Amino acid sequence: MSQWEIVIGLETHAQLSTHSKIFSGASTAFGAEPNTQACAVDLGLPGVLPVPNQGAVERAIRFGLAVGAQIAPMSVFARKNYFYPDLPKGYQISQFELPVVQGGSMTIHTAAGEKTVRLTRAHLEEDAGKSLHEDFHGSSGIDLNRAGTPLLEIVTEPDMRSADEAVAYARALHGLVRWIEICDGNMQEGSFRCDVNVSVRPFGQREYGTRCEIKNLNSFRFIERAIDCEVKRQIALIEDGGAVRQETRLYDPDRDETRSMRSKEDAQDYRYFPDPDLPPLRIDEAWVREVAAGLPELPAARRVRYQRDLGLGAYDAGLLTASREAGDYFEALQRAAPGVDAKVCANWVNGELAAALNRAELDFTASRVTADRLAGLLRRLADGTVSGKIAKEIFELMWTEGGDADAIIDARGLRQISDSGALEAVLREIVERSPAQVAEYRGGKEKVFGFFVGQAMKATQGKANPAQLNELLRKLLAG
Amino acid sequence: MNLDTLLDGPLRGLAGALARREVQAAEVARAYLDRIAAANALLNCFITVDRERSLHEAEAADRWLDARAAGGADAPASTLLPPQLSGLLAGVPVAHKDIFCAEGWRTTCGSRMLENFVAPYDAHVITRFRAAGAVTLGRANMDEFAMGSSNENSWFGPVRNPWDTSRVPGGSSGGSAAAVAAGLAPAATGTDTGGSIRQPAAWCGVSGIKPTYGRVSRYGMIAFASSLDQGGAFARRAEDLALLLDVMAGHDARDATSAVRQDGSFTGLLGQDLTGLRVGVPRDWFGSGLAAGIGTAVQAALEQLQRQGCVLVDIDLPASRHAIPAYYVIAPAECSSNLSRFDGVRFGHRAAGYRDLTELYERSRAEGFGAEVKRRILIGSYVLSHGYYDAYYLQAQKVRRLIADDFTRAFASCDLIAGPVTPTSAFRLGACNEDPVQMYLEDMYTIPVNLAGLPGMSIPAGFDNGLPVGLQLIGPWWQEARLLQVAHAYQQHTDWHRARPAGVPGVSA
C-alpha cells in the first residue's frame, strides 16, 4: 500500500438557501407533496423562459469572496443537453466555459497538519427532479418539486492525498457554506452532496493515474469509506496487472464497495452551448463590494484570532470554528464571564457542553444550558465556591433539570468546604482511625496519600477544597 | 357605414366605430367567423376556429365598451397596459399564430406533437391583447414549430395563397399572412426567426413587421431558435401595425431577453414628411439571384420613395452572403435543444406500446415531429457535438457578429435600408419538396436582419406575374417607428396595399 500515492479531487453540490428556485418563482421548500412546487417554468411547458434568481447569484458571490476566489464580472449560463424523465426541458441550465466563481482555496487541518486545497471553480446550476420507482407498478413516477432548485457546484483541484484530507475538506466546506448562510448543509435531504474523483499512482510519478468518479456521497463517513474501498480496488487491480478504467461509480454502503455505473465510452455528449434565453450574467464591482460588506468574520480569521489573541491551542480553536454557532456560543460565554480564563471557557464548550449537545443531537443554538447560565457556573468555579468535580455535577443538573448554578449550589448544599478548621477536624478523625495506613505512608509509601484524599472526599461528599485538603493532610501526616 | 367597408378599412376606424358603439364587437366577430367558415376549407389559414369562444370574447368586449360609452366606472381592463392602451383594441378581432400559448385555446405549433395541447397559461403577447380588449379570432396555421418558408410543413396541411391557390403563402406564419390577405382577419400575430413574417407578408401582399429582438416578450411563444425568434404582426397597412405593436411590445420580467425601453408610441412618426431621409440600398441584393419582376417592382418602390423626398445611398453588406449558412447552424443548434422538452413524458404526443424509456422517447418523437423538424434537430445536434462545436457553432457566431457590424457601418450613412424581401415570388405547392436548400435560399434577404436583431418590415410594392411583391425596410435597432413612418408615407402615395385577391369564398372583393 505504501508505494501508492492517492490523489483525490471533489465536486460538491451545495443547495443554495433561496426561498424560490433559480429560474422560477416556485418554492424550494423540502418535503412537499410531489409536483406541488413546480410551476410552468419548472415543468418545462412550451414557451416558458428562465429568469435568474438574484439571491442565488448573491450566494455564489458570498462563497467566492469567502474562499478568496475571483468573481467573474461576466459569466455564462450554458445548456447541458440530455434526455431523462426527471429533466423536464431535456437540458440542464448550468455554467460551462465561464463560471461565476473562479479559483480560490480552502485551508484544511488533519492530524498531518495544515494544508491548502485549491479550488478550480464554483458554478451555478439547476437541480433536476426525482424519479420515483417505488409505489408504482410497472411504471415510474416523476416528482418535479426539486427541479430548478439552485445549486452551487464547487470543484477542487486534485490536491488531496488521503481519505482523511478529503473528509477534512468536505467538513471544512460544509462548515463554511453554513457559516456564510448560503446552504443549510442538510445532508440527509441532499442539500450537500459530494462526487469524489479518486486515482492512485506510484510515489514519485508525475502523471496522474486513471481516475474514477464516485457519485452522490451524502455523508462524511460514506466519503471516507468510498475512498478507502475505491483505493483498495484500484491498487489490487493494478497490482494484478490490470488497468483502471475511467468510469463513474456508485458507493454501496450496505456492501461497502463501489460499483460501476457507466464507463467513459458510454459518456454522453452533452452538447453544451450558451443558453440563448439568458444573457451573460454580469456582476459589477459595486455589487461585489456590497456583498463583501455583509459577510461575517470567516472561520479562518476567527481561528487565527482565537489562537493569537486568546492563546487557545490549535485543537480548541479548530473545534470552536467548526461552526459559526460554536464560536458565537464561546464568545457569548466569554462576554458573560469576563474574569474566567479563555482556555477554561474553551475547555467547557468543547468538553462538557459539546458532549451534552452531541448526546442530545442538538446544536449550539438549541443548547439547554445557555451561555449566560454556563458563565454563572464558571464564575463559581473560578472563585472557589465549587470544585471542578462538583462543577461538572452541577452542569449535569443544569442540563437535565434547568436552573442556574447558584440556585443549585444553595439548594443542594454543594458549596465547597474551605473552612480550614472544619476540614482539619474531619481529617484528624480519619488519621486517628487509620493507624495502619499512617504507618505505611510514613514508611515511604506515597501512594497511600490517595487513600486519605478519598476518605476525606467521601466524608465531605466531595465538597472539600482540593488544594486546601492536600495541604492540611500533608501537614497532619507529617506528624 | 357598410360593414364590409369597415372590416377592410384601417384598424383605427374599426376600433373607433366599436368605441362609438356604431357597430357591435359580436357583429364584427360574426362577420369574420362567417368569412372563415366559407373560405377556410380552401385556404386552410386556421388550425383552430372556436366560434363560441370567439363570440364569448366579443360579447365581453361589447359589455366593456357599453359600460365605457355609458360613462360608467372605468373598465375592468388590467393594469398591465398603460391607460392609453387599455381597451385600445376593444372588440377588434385578431388571429393568433398557433405558436402563442393562450389559456383555453389549443396551441399546436403546427405539429402533431402538440395536436391536443391546451396551454394552461397565456403568452405575454396574448395577455396584452386581452388587456387591450382584442377578440381572438382563431389560431392561424403555420409551418411546424415555425420551421419552413412555405407553410407546407404543417401537420394540419398546407395553407394556400389567396392570390393563387395552387401556390404557397410563404412561411412560417403563412396562415396569419393568408388570413389577412384574404380578408379573414383584419390583423394577425406572427413570429419571425429568419423571415417568417416578412416573407409570407411579401408573398400574400400584406404588411408585416418583425420588431427589434427584445421588443416583444417571448414568454409563452413556443421557441424555435431563442436568439432569433421575435413576435410581430400582420395587417393591411403600416398604420395598423403601429397600433398592434403599441399593444404587443413592452418589457416583460419573465423574459430575460426582453428590453426595457422608453421609445414612446409606434405611431409617433406617422404622417411625418420623408424629406432628407437617407435610404440605404444594398446593391449586392439586386444581383443575378433576384427574379427580374421583383427587381423591377422594388426598384420602382425605391424611386417612389425618392419622389417623396428620400435620398438613396448605396451601401455594402458583404457578410450577408454568409447569412444562410450561419443561420442554418445557429437556428438548428438552438432548436435541437429547445425541442428536447417534447419527449412524450409530461405533455404532447406519446407513442402507444413502447417497451422502455428509450423507445418511449424515440417513437414519440419519431411520430410527433415532421421531416423538416427532424432534419433541423439532426443538423443542430451535429453542429453542437463534441469536436464540431468550434468549427460550426462558434464560427457561425463570428459570422453573426460580422453581419451585425456590416449593418452598424451601413447605418452610419443611412437612416434605414430598403430592398427586396425574397428573391422570387410564391412558388407552387410541392415545388421545393425535393430540395430544402432551394427553400432555405428564399430567406437570403431576411435572415441577415434576424442575425443582427434588427427591426424589419415587408410592405406590398407591386406584382410579378400577378403575384404580390414585397418591399423590405430595415431599420437601426429600436427604430420601428422610423420604418412605420416610411411605410405609412409610401402607402399614402401607393395603392398596392389596397389590392385584394379575387375569388375568396365568402368575401366580396
Image (cartoon, coloured by chain):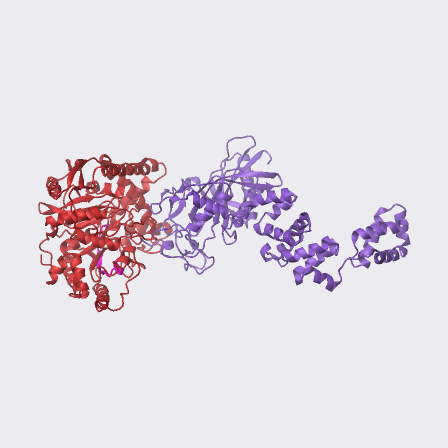
Q: Residue A97, percent across and down?
A: 40, 40
Q: In the rendered view of the protein, which quadrant contains the N terminus of chain A?
A: top right
Q: Residue B432, percent across and down?
A: 18, 44
Q: Residue A426, percent across and down?
A: 85, 58
How many marks the image carries: the answer is: 0
Report which quarter residue B156 is drawn in: bottom left
Report which quarter residue B116 is drawn in: bottom left
B215 is within the stretch colored magenta: no
Q: In this view, does A238 lie above or below A148?
A: above
Chain in red? B
B134 is within the stretch colored magenta: yes
Q: Is residue B100 left or right of residue B303?
A: right
Q: Magenta residues?
A: B129-143
Q: Name the tint of chain A in the rendering.
A: purple
Residue B83 visible in rendering = yes
The residue closer to the viewer here, A246 or A371, is A371
The residue closer to the viewer here, A391 or A85, is A391
The residue closer to the viewer here, A129 or B138, is B138
Q: Is residue B302 left or right of residue A433?
A: left
Q: Which residue is drawn at 61% across and 48% down?
A: A320
Q: Residue A8, percent across and down?
A: 53, 39
Q: Is residue A215 left or right of residue B411?
A: right
Residue B149 visible in rendering = no
